[in-house]
Amino acid sequence: MLRELLRLVEAADGPITLAELGRELNVDVAVLDGMLQHWVRKGRLVTDSGTAKSCAGGCGCMSVGGGCGSCAGMAACPFVARLPVVYRLKLDE
Amino acid sequence: MMTIATAPAVRAVSVALAGNPNAGKTTLFNALTGARQHVGNWPGKTVEKKTGILVRDALRLDITDLPGAYSLSAYSLEEVVARDFILDERPDVVLAVVDAANLERNLYLVVQLLELETPSVIALNMIDVAMRQGLDFDVARLSEALGAAVVPMAARRGEGLEHAVAAVTAAAVVPRSPFRLDYGPAVEAEIDRLVATLAQLPLTCPARWLAIKLLEDDADMATKVAAAAGGAKVLATAADARGQLEAALGEDADTVMADRRYAWIHALVGQAMHAERADVLTLSDRIDRFATHRLLGIPLFLAAMWLVFKVTTDLSAPWVDWLDAVLTGPLSRWMLAALGALGLGQTWVASMAVDGVLAGVGSVLAFVPVLLALYFALAVLEDSGYMARGAFVMDRLMKRIGLQGRSFLPLMVGFGCSVPAIYATRTLTNQRDRVLTGLLVPFISCGARLPVYVLFAAIFFPARAGLVILGLYVLGIVVALGVGLLLQRTLLPATVEAGLVMELPPYRLPNARSIGFHMWQRTRAFLQHAASLILMMTLAIWLLTAIPLGGAGTFANTPMSASAFGRVSALAAPALRPLGFGSWESGGALLTGLVAKEVVVSTLAQIHDVAPAPDGAEATTFAGDLVAIVTSFGRAVVETLRAIPGLVGINLTAGQTGDDAALSTALRASFDESSGGHAAAAGLAFMVFVLLYTPCMAAVAAERHELGARWMWLSLFGQLAIAWLAALTVFQLGRLWGGG
């Protein structure tokens, strides 16, 4: 199942939703999440939770230590919209 | 510490409560132990530890609530704590709590718990919820396959608790034979080889389980084995076994074994769980059939973006006007009156206070309604779950310019205001995407440029104003795409990306509280960053207009053409001459546009001396002003409500006033003169220049914060060059075409 999942991700022509992938594999989305996490741990996929990344540096809301001074943290950066969790193949740079 | 019951218990059974997060473990723990709980931390860990006691006649259960975990592979602190407790404390029974509605995922942990060979009971929790979802379970089949008692229960309703206690008691007394999942001949052979090697070690855990962990290359267990006498030999055997398996199966042993677990569980669930409505799609699935459709998805998303744009511009317009009226009317009068009372009425101080400070505050406040409207629209899209679909459908399209689908969001925010749009690039995965998106944002026509288009399109293209304005928006997108392609092939080559999977959240009704919170947070954050800069630049421009050069007038009382501002603007005129608007007036308006694009029109009005008469001249009272503020506020509310039905229509040229008409005449004459009789071509070139040239100072500052100084300078001068070339092309072609 894990290898079939990776094959499907590799063969996908364009983006694919977790629900579509679940239907393809006849597996519940919650199970799929665990399976994708396996490939993330193995370094074959990378995941992006959609939270803020740091700015180029020196911006007013960033403290010296790299955290967000005026906000509750990167995850609460007010400038950032809540976007979906993404998994993508990790290719050799 | 809570009071511990002192019932005359004759038999104590230690129970570990394990399960996935949100499986109802804590609910069951509370239901079993009631108030007899102790809450602390696991030794040396920040993970909460809860223990409690249940006393039944001659039985006492010492229950430990383990942290929620998805596996026992020690990938997280919670998993390490849970695993170490079972291995080190050896509880009499593990009570594994599973969410019946998510059985397949929950069983992954259960299988690993069972491999620890501790007597176990499976609590099939939230059975009521699962049954409402049309799920039915063959409990006997589950129990047989797992080698443990399976107790259906609804802990929240207190159903099945007694059965669970009875099963736990029975498991402690009469253990079943250990659970054994068959990993296939190749893996089983290596497990057996390792088990034989492990016989040399003094083990405190099951040999088969340890062999499995070593085949999985579990670092934690490898460290423990290495510390034991003879451990090195075991680890060498394990490494050899992993190599053999990888060579034979073409995948590492960890993946092969996890794959086997998933497949075994999938097959078991297929046999032991029946879904009455397996083929029924959820509402989200049904909506997504259209929303994420390859062909329909994009026009639907573009329609949503159009609505966002209309909300941003149309709903904020009455409030921008109201703020402008209050600032230039009553507030200016009150300030002048106060300064007059102090004897500073006709001095430079009054000029600075009204034309510098108050105008600066006005420039900042003008952003507020626009941003609130923009963030309202975005928060609704986010909260409803549609934003994620937007990123999904745009991914394929954005790939063409080497960007990800998420990049569309900052670009779309750019239609409202470039500054938050540049900040919104923070969500992008890598620096290259952040830089490229941040550089493209200013080409997207922000709301502040619209008044310029509306005025100029009405003057030079009255019959086709709407079309011209739409064309400018499209031009901005086309230029952004072109620049994106150019940068992708030069300075910012695309990184290869493939196989994108997105986890789309289910749709839900937006929450008013959450929307309000986001609107406020984002608007406040923007103002904190941009307000001081805009104020400073406004004061700098005022200072330039106040300084007399060439002998005409005195400080703060000089014609604009003879001020330092006029002279600086005149320096730009020769460069603008080939574009058809090479006058100091146009140069001056574009110069102030660097502060904020909104002020281009007001500067033109000021320069051409067609601004409304000073409000201070009107005979009004303080009370009259207050009434005017309140009534105009009411009018803004009504106009906002009236604008709502119009969100689906276009009425871009409405509301031209008498002042605009006077300005129109002055501008047509000015452009006629500067273009040698080709005013329309020059007017169009001016609009194109405004669309593409360097964004406002706040946006430039945002670029510096987010992208760094190097990219900021490239953007600043690059956009200026592109704007100049584009305006030159438009004017020269227009002139040849005969655009007069």
Image (cartoon, rainbow, N blue to C red):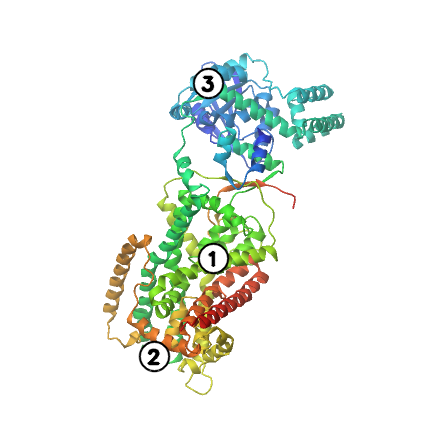
CA gap, disc 1 and disc 3: 61 Å
Q: How many marks?
A: 3
Q: Which mark is residue B261?
A: none
CA gap, disc 1 and disc 2: 49 Å
Percent x, y for residue B589? 43, 72
Q: Which residue is mark 1?
A: B477
Q: Which residue is mark 2?
A: B345
Q: In which chain is the residue bearing label 3?
A: B
Percent x, y for residue B286? 40, 36
- Label located before the other in sequence (1 or 3): 3
Q: In which chain is the residue bearing label 2?
A: B
Residue at figure coordinates x 41%, y 70% from the top left = B600
Same subunit, tags 1 and 2: yes
Q: Residues within 10 Å of mark 2 (few under 14, many from 20)?
A: some
Front position among marks 2 and 3? 3
Quadrant of the snapshot with the C terminus of chain B:
bottom left
In the image, B349 versus B578, the foreground residue is B578
Give amino acid for label 1.
Ile
